[in-house]
Amino acid sequence: MNLLEKARQFLARRRTVYVATFLNPMGEEVLKDLARFCRAHETTFHVDARAHAVAEGRREVWLRIQRHLQLTEGQLWQLYGAPQSQSNQE
């Protein structure tokens, strides 16, 4: 197995783990809490630059979780792992 295939398998496993963790009743409860904490459905703008940076960091975590729950393995590969020449072909 080559390095690209290992990377692709790693990403597929990571998606599987996210799904197993969050797509169940307890995980859904955690997601609701994280949505509020990470400002999933509201602006992260704050006049204080540091507070804004903190809010953006939280939002970045939320977006990562959502990508792993909503995108297919192929879409995640395009986003995170595929070399440029391969991502243009798929």
Image (tube, grey):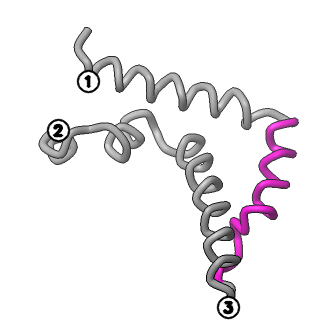
Most common secondary structure along the magenta stretch: helix
Disc on the earlier residue, 2 or 1? 1
| Residue 25 on image: x %, y % | 86, 36
> Which residue is at the front of the view, 38 or 87?
38
Residue pictured at 63% horizontal, 33% vertical: 18
| Residue 88 on image: x %, y % | 16, 47
State which mark lies toward you, 2 or 1. Answer: 1
| Residue 73 on image: x %, y % | 43, 33
Residue pictured at 18% horizontal, 45% vertical: 84
In magenta stretch: residue 44? yes
Q: In which quarter of the image is residue 54?
A: bottom right
Q: Give the range drawn in magenta.
A: 26-45
In the rendered view, tell whether residue 30 sits above or below residue 38: above
Residue pictured at 82% horizontal, 54% vertical: 32
Residue at the extreme bottom of the image, as rendered? 47
Mark 3 lies on a secondary structure that is loop
User: Which residue is identified by label 3?
Assistant: 47
Asked whether the beta carbons under mark 2 and mark 1 sit within 8 Å of each other, the answer is yes
User: Which residue is identified by label 1?
Assistant: 4
Q: In which quarter of the image is the N terminus?
A: top left
Q: Which amino acid does label 1 sit on?
A: Leu
